[in-house]
Image: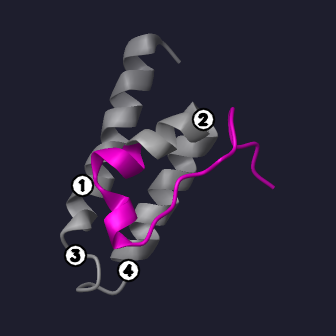
Amino acid sequence: MTKTEKEDRLMELYARIEDQVEFVDIKSYSHNIISLNLQIISKEFGYDEANKAIDEFALTLLGWKHSKKKGKNKGK
């Protein structure tokens, strides 16, 4: 994946989160969609980038917590 493709991918994931933030506690699956996109970010771009997304959308105010792990999420 080129640098531009990676940036586009990250912006796509950020956009998905942004689309759901206003619906937390209103629509049934908004929490799940946000969490899944944060997991994808951590796996593809690393925990630090997922933490940046949490900060970007003030998700700590909605119940999310920062990961203390470093590096990329290897998945299970």
Q: Amino acid at mark 2?
A: Gly
- Name the residue that disc number 1 marks: 18
The Cα–Cα distance between marks 2 and 4, rounded to whole angstroms, is: 24 Å
Q: Quadrant of residue 21?
A: bottom left
Query: Which one is earlier in the sequence, the residue at label 4 or at label 3?
Result: 3
Instruction: State which region is magenta.
Output: 53-76
- Name the residue that disc number 3 marks: 23
Q: Amino acid at mark 4?
A: Tyr
The Cα–Cα distance between marks 4 and 1, rounded to whole angstroms, is: 14 Å
Quarter of the rendering occupied by the C terminus: bottom right
From the image, give the main secondary structure of the stretch colored magenta.
Answer: loop
Which residue: 34% across, 28% down?
Answer: 8
Position in image of residue 57 (x %, y %): 28, 52
Query: Which one is earlier in the sequence, the residue at label 2 or at label 4?
Result: 4
Q: Is residue 69 magenta?
A: yes
Query: Which one is earlier in the sequence, the residue at label 3 or at label 2?
Result: 3
**Which of the pair 1/67 is nearer the observer?**
67
Helix, strand or loop at disc 2? loop
- Name the residue that disc number 4 marks: 29
Q: Amino acid at mark 1?
A: Glu
> Relative to 14, is 32 on the left or the right?
right
The Cα–Cα distance between marks 3 and 1, rounded to whole angstroms, is: 10 Å
The Cα–Cα distance between marks 4 and 3, rounded to whole angstroms, is: 9 Å
Which residue: 39% across, 62% down?
Answer: 60
Helix, strand or loop at disc 1? helix
The Cα–Cα distance between marks 3 and 2, rounded to whole angstroms, is: 26 Å
Position in image of residue 1 (x %, y %): 53, 18
Query: Which one is earlier in the sequence, the residue at label 4 or at label 1?
Result: 1
Helix, strand or loop at disc 4? loop
> Relative to 38, is 11 on the left or the right?
left
The Cα–Cα distance between marks 1 and 2, rounded to whole angstroms, is: 19 Å
